[in-house]
Amino acid sequence: MKLKIFTALAALSLTQCTSLNLEQCKHSDWYSLGMTDGNSGSASSTLNGYIEDCSEFGLRVNSEQWIAGYRAGLENYCQPENGYKLGLQGSYYNGVCSNNEFLKRYNEGHRQFEIKNKISKIQSRLKDIERELTEVNKKINAKQDVASNKEDKKSLKNERHDLEKELMLLRIGAADILPIQLLF
């Protein structure tokens, strides 16, 4: 029976990232834990996980203290510049801030993150195309399946042209929001 309970608790802890053990339920500083959760932008439903975890041990969570700490933590988390930083890092946002300026700055940062990633992917593909063109040219020079390789070469050059054009447009469009060193 104990093995079944242990297995069930272990499985439950794997599905919940907010899982608390007996000692944590007994000795948690609920205000500090709430503040930590608020500072990290965790969803308010995190508290429900704590309540569920601790109730399994017959213990109660001091919800009022957690909520007070959580709100204090959210005040730090929901600052507009933090939103910008989180967006720029590509971090996930749980929708916990009522501050519209936070969301505006998060979206600005996230847009920069997406542009930077798109530029990086295009640059990587362009390098791959150059390697593929080198291989195709070697095959053409060696008179291996020349017609097929010439078709591949044409296709690769067309793709390279399209990607270079897209890259140029991204750089032009991003010039006003991305630092120059991120564009090249």
Image (cartoon, grey):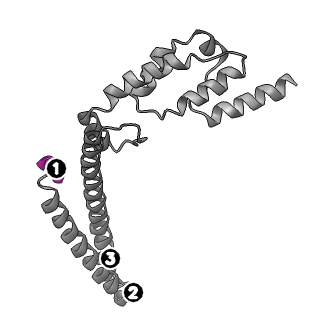
Q: Nearer the viewer, residue 105 or 16?
A: 105
Q: Image check: 131 left or right of 44?
A: left
Q: Nearer the viewer, residue 161 or 175?
A: 175
Q: Which mark is residue 178?
A: 1
Provide the residue span drawn in magenta: 177-183
The numbered mark, 3 or 2, whose residue comes first in the sequence reads 3
Q: Label 2: which residue?
A: 145
Residue type at the position of mark 2: Asp
Q: Is residue 70 above or below residue 30?
A: below
Q: Quadrant of residue 125?
A: bottom left
Residue type at the position of mark 3: Val
Label 2 packing within 10 angstroms: few (<14), some (14-19), many (20+):
few
Q: Nearer the viewer, residue 156 or 98?
A: 98
Q: Label 3: which residue?
A: 136
- In front of the other: label 1 or label 3? 1
Residue type at the position of mark 1: Leu
